[in-house]
Image (cartoon, rainbow, N blue to C red):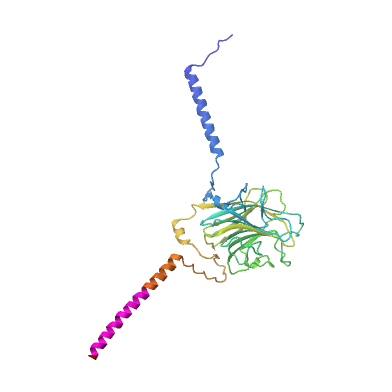
């Protein structure tokens, strides 16, 4: 029988060292692989940071019930375990979900995971949902559950054609509208007179996930969709020269009438886009006070003057009183001098 060769102490020490280093390296790789930071980089594009104060995903703890929640429910909207239902598949329902925190980002991207489904067949369903970036929040109305003559941006997923004569447009249909508060959404014509553009989007009763992304970078609005189950973005609307003020609110809403559908929102994720502006562009892209679109004339709307603060009002009143007292004293002095001169001439 051959004698067994035992490794020397030096070989045993090297084997143990390799084992320890390999275990450490494996642990480090596992830790790096498990950590998912709130950012990612697109090749050749900006860094995207997830803004949690403007985002919503499962589990929806405290939404609509807690005072500390970042999101408010309105109307018939309800929280479920896997989604937030804006409206059920019932007639004459209306619901909305609104972020409580105003957004002051310059460049951003909003990704919306949604689902529209119901029992209606062919064209017997409606009406659709909308995604908002507007000055006012929690204002129910006729435009997909939100107020008419809104101020800001509205993106509509319209599932029912109201205009019977049109033939070139296939529904469901995605469109966008920028409003300074002067325009009404034309329901009878499915918003065509005021839309920036649009595309057909077959999104009802699909077995796979449906997504919509709204990207706003350097006054350039891009809307894309992923509705084919291929995990690929498809272009829908491209519009340069869009000017949106900062400090508006994100929200989504839906409405049903004689026809209905389930309108569900699974998640809303807002990313801040950085590294997309040069110093020269920062100077050119100054803040605006009313939404507008270059080469698209909107009816003029005057910006209301900002109300005076308590301190400003106090200072105005105070200095007005000081000026009045000063004027009265000067007047009395001049009057006394005039009287003295009159007496000297008399004597």
Residue at figure coordinates x 52%, y 32% from the top left: 25
Q: Residue furthest bottom?
A: 346
The percent position of residue 8, horizontal first and vertical second, equals: 49, 16
The percent position of residue 108, horizontal first and vertical second, equals: 54, 54
Q: Is residue 7 above or below residue 342?
A: above
Q: Quadrant of residue 145?
A: bottom right
The percent position of residue 345, horizontal first and vertical second, equals: 24, 90
Residue 129 seen in the figure: no
Residue at figure coordinates x 46%, y 58% from the top left: 282
231 to the left or right of 101: right
* Viewer-closest of 48 and 142: 142
271 to the left or right of 88: left
Q: Quadrant of residue 235?
A: bottom right
Decide whether residue 305 is among the magenta residues: no
Q: Is residue 9 above or below residue 49?
A: above
Residue at figure coordinates x 55%, y 57% from the top left: 216
Q: Main secondary structure of the magenta part?
A: helix
Q: Quadrant of the N terminus?
A: top right
* Viewer-closest of 331 and 185: 331
């Amino acid at each position: 029988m051959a004698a067994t060769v035992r490794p020397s102490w030096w070989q045993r020490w090297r084997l143990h060292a390799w084992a320890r280093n390999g275990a450490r390296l494996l642990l480090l790789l596992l830790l790096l692989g498990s950590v998912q930071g709130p950012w990612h980089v697109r090749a050749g594009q900006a860094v995207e940071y997830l803004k949690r104060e403007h985002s919503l995903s499962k589990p929806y703890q405290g939404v609509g019930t807690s005072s500390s929640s970042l999101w408010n429910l309105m109307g018939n909207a309800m929280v479920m375990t896997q989604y937030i239902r804006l409206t059920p598949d019932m007639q004459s329902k209306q619901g909305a979900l609104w972020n409580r925190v105003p957004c002051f980002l310059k460049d951003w991207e909003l990704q919306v995971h949604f689902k529209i489904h119901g029992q209606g067949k062919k064209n017997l369903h409606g009406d659709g949902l909308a995604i908002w970036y507007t000055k006012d929040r929690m204002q129910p109305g006729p435009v997909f559950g939100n107020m008419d003559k809104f101020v800001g941006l509205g993106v509509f997923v319209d599932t029912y054609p109201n205009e019977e004569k049109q033939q070139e447009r296939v529904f469901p249909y995605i469109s966008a509208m920028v409003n300074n508060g002067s325009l009404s959404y034309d329901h009878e014509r499915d918003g065509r007179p005021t839309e920036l553009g649009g595309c057909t989007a077959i999104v009802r009763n699909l077995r796979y996930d449906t997504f919509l992304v709204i990207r706003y970078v350097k006054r350039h609005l891009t809307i894309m969709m992923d509705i084919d189950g291929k995990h690929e973005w498809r272009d829908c609307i491209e519009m340069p020269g869009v000017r949106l003020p900062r400090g508006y609110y994100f929200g989504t809403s839906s409405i049903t009438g004689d026809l209905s559908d389930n309108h569900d929102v699974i998640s809303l994720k807002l990313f801040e886009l950085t590294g997309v502006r040069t110093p020269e562009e920062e100077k050119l892209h100054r803040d605006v006070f009313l939404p507008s679109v270059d080469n698209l004339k909107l009816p003029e709307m005057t910006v209301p003057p900002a109300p005076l603060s308590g301190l400003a009002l106090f200072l105005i009143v105070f200095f007005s009183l000081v000026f009045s007292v000063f004027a009265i004293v000067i007047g009395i002095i001049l009057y006394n001098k005039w009287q003295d001169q009159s007496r000297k001439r008399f004597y």
